[in-house]
Image (spheres, grey):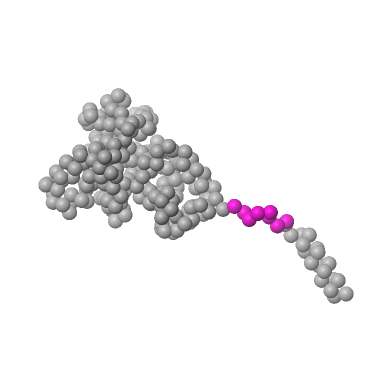
Amino acid sequence: MRYALLTTACILLAACMPPAPKSPPSDPLAPYRAALAGLPPEIMARAEAAPVRFAGLLRRIWAVEDPLYLARVDKEKPLPADYEPGDLVSLAEYPFALARRDLRLRKPAAEAARELDAAAKAAGVTLVFSSAYRSYAYQSEVYERHVRELGEAAADRISARPGRSQHQLGTVVDFGSIDNTFAESKAGLWMAANAGRFGFSLSYPRGAEGLTGYDWESWHYRYVGKEAAALEAEFFGLQHWMLVFLERLFSGF
Ligand SMILES: [Zn+2]
């Protein structure tokens, strides 16, 4: 009798239970967990709070044809001396305010800059393009000039050795004065608030020198694409961490 009651209770209980899933629930973060695990824990926490959004942005980023848009280039990860993008265009062909006429960018970055520049103009802001693509040889000259003027240690804080400059990618623009008075200028404030919407990201923010290897550069923006700019803003907080994450993901570390 006792056994029969127990059996009935079990059958009733089973009837109330939801059916077991045929396969375990899928985890959108599964392909990314290992690469995220080595980064600051708040990044994983943000991804876990919005896993579908995180994975969806990454899937759209894969659609970018050229991974160099998101290559990590810094003091630890140099570009080859002979790397020169094949699609550089003259910014003199665009309606930009140029500090010099010989500036060039990769075409997709220049087109994104056209959109950025038009939005700035519509808001009554003038963006002055002061520097863009720099070849390995040109970066050598810039760095050596800084060493002559400041000494090696001080030069390394503000200037990249050849191969270590994001400018060699052809996707970076220095705006305005190329000093931190830019941050408080109308253009600097507008860029800080709006650049991400057009796919541009501040490479060397204030207080991140220990990670990026460079002093705060409020004027130096890198084109990463709209999806990557959103990924950075929503999950990584810093371009550096996003690039490290992508590098880990691509290389399988
Ligand atoms: Zn720069």
Q: Position of residue 147 (x, y in %)?
A: 14, 48
Furthest toward the right, the residue is 1
- In the rendered image, which quarter contains the C terminus? bottom left
Taking depth in this image into account, of 184 and 30 the one nearest to the observer is: 30
| Residue at the image point whose x is 50% and y is 43% from the top | 59
Q: Is residue 165 magenta?
A: no
In the displayed structure image, the side of residue 181 where residue 35 appears, left or right: right
| Residue at the image point whose x is 22% and y is 31% from the top | 99
Would you place residue 21 above or below residue 128 in this image? below
| Residue at the image point whose x is 72% and y is 57% from the top | 18
**Residue 111, located in which quarter of the rendered image?**
top left
Q: Position of residue 122 (x, y in %)?
A: 37, 28
Our reading of the magenta stretch's main secondary structure is loop
Furthest toward the bottom, the residue is 2
Q: What count of labels does the image hold?
A: 0
| Residue at the image point whose x is 77% and y is 62% from the top | 14
In the displayed structure image, the side of residue 159 where residue 54 appears, left or right: right
- In the rendered image, which quarter contains the N terminus? bottom right
Taking depth in this image into account, of 49 and 135 the one nearest to the observer is: 135
**Which residues are drawn in magenta?**
19-26
Q: Position of residue 139 (x, y in %)?
A: 21, 41
Q: Is residue 184 visible?
A: no
In the displayed structure image, the side of residue 120 where residue 41 appears, left or right: right
**Residue 220, located in which quarter of the rendered image?**
top left
Furthest toward the left, the residue is 148
Q: Is residue 64 visible?
A: yes
In the displayed structure image, the side of residue 145 where residue 111 appears, left or right: right
Q: Position of residue 9 (x, y in %)?
A: 81, 67
